[in-house]
Image (cartoon, rainbow, N blue to C red):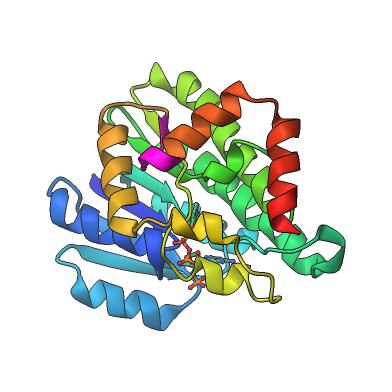
Amino acid sequence: MKYIAIITGASSGIGREFAYAIDQGMSSIDEIWLVARRKDRLEDLAGKLHHHSRLICGDLSSRITVNRIQAILKAEKCRVRFLINAAGYGILGDFEKCDRKDETGMCDLNVRALTDLTYVCIPFMGKGSRIINLASSAAFVPQLGFSVYAATKSYVLSFSRSLNMELNKKGIYITAVCPGPVKTEFFDVAEKNGNKTMSLKKAAMTTTDVVVKTALNDSFRKKEVSVPTLTMKLFCIMCKVLPHRIIMKVTSLLYR
Ligand SMILES: NC(=O)c1ccc[n+]([C@@H]2O[C@H](COP(=O)([O-])OP(=O)(O)OC[C@H]3O[C@@H](n4cnc5c(N)ncnc54)[C@H](OP(=O)(O)O)[C@@H]3O)[C@@H](O)[C@H]2O)c1
C-alpha cells in the first residue's frame, strides 16, 4: 500500500505552499501528487521536494484529468492520506460584462472538479485521511462584482461541512479553509479585465504560509472550518450577526 497526498493547484500560491508543508512535515507520506496545467512549474516544484512526487499535468475543468487520477489510484493500490483541493480562480467584474467562458469556468473548476475529485478519492481513503478544501471568506456573504466566485465558494463551504459529518464515522475529516485576500497570483487572474480589488480588502492581505500552517493545524484538530486571520474571523462573525442585505449595501458603495 502506497500512502499519498494529492494537491491540486500545486503550481502556484496556496497549493504550492501546501506541497512544501507536507514535504517537510509528513514522513508517513510515500508520494506527493502535484496537479495543475503548467508542467514547467510542477517540474520546478518537484525538484525542490524531498518526497517522491508524481506530476499530473492537465486541466481539471475537463473530466479527463480526474479520470486519469482515478485510473492511477486504481492501478497502484493507493491510500489517499491527504486530498488538498486548492485549484481555483475568480474573475472580478459585473457578471454580464465578463466573459461567458470565464464565468462558467469558475463553476467547472471551483465546484464541479472539486466535487468530482473528492468523489473519486473517497474510496481510497480510510481512518485518518483528510480533505482540505479551499473555500474563501467570500463564502460568508454574496459579493458584488464577484458574484459567481463567491457563490462557488459558498458551495465549497456548505459541501465540505456536511460531507465532513457524513465521513466522520469512517475517521475521515474535512476542513474548509476560508482565508481573506492572500498574496498570490490569484489577483493577476482576478483583475485581468482591469477591475481592481477593493483597497480595504488588500489591506487585510495575508501570506500563504499563514493560511497553510493554520489550515493544517485546524485539520489535525478536526475543525470543519479554518479561518486564518483575526480580521477574517471578525468578518465571519459580522456575516453571522448582521443581515446580509446591509453588508451587501455597504460593500456596493465601496465597489462602485
Ligand atoms: N489568493 C487569495 O486571495 C485567495 C483567498 C481565498 C481563497 N483562495 C482560494 O485558494 C485557492 C488557491 O488560490 P491561490 O491564491 O493559490 O491562486 P493561484 O496562485 O492563482 O493558484 C491557482 C492554482 O490553480 C490552478 N488552476 C487554475 N485553473 C486550473 C485548471 N483549469 N486546471 C487545473 N488547475 C488549475 C493553477 O495552476 P495552473 O495555472 O498551472 O493550471 C494554480 O496552481 C483557490 O481555490 C482560491 O479560490 C484564494
Q: Residue furthest right?
A: 96
Q: How many marks?
A: 0
Quadrant, the C terminus: bottom right
Give the residue displayed 52% in from the left and 45% down from the top: 136
146 left or right of 162 in image: right
Is 50 rendered above or below residue 217?
below
Compare residues 134 and 214 and report the one nearer the observer: 214
Q: Nearer the viewer, residue 126 or 76?
A: 126
Is 28 in the magenta? no
Which quadrant would residue 65 be assigned to in this image?
bottom right
Residue 230 located within the stretch drawn in magenta? yes
Q: Which residues lie in the magenta part?
A: 225-231
From the viewer's perspective, tell me whether residue 206 is left or right of residue 95.
Answer: left
Residue 112 appears in view: yes
Q: Hey, which residue is sitting farthest bottom in the picture?
A: 40
Residue that appears at 38% across and 59% down = 15
- Residue sitting nearer the eye, 66 or 253: 253
Q: Name the residue furthest top.
A: 169
Residue 2, position as x, y percentages in the image: 24, 49
Q: Position of residue 218 (x, y in %)?
A: 30, 34
Residue 176 showing in the rendered view = no
Q: Residue at x 59, y 72 (%)?
A: 189
Name above or below for residue 74 compared with residue 158. Answer: below
At x 32%, y 47%, the residue is 78
Indicate the quadrant containing the N terminus: top left, top right, bottom left or bottom right: top left
Residue 154 position, x and y percent, is: 63, 38
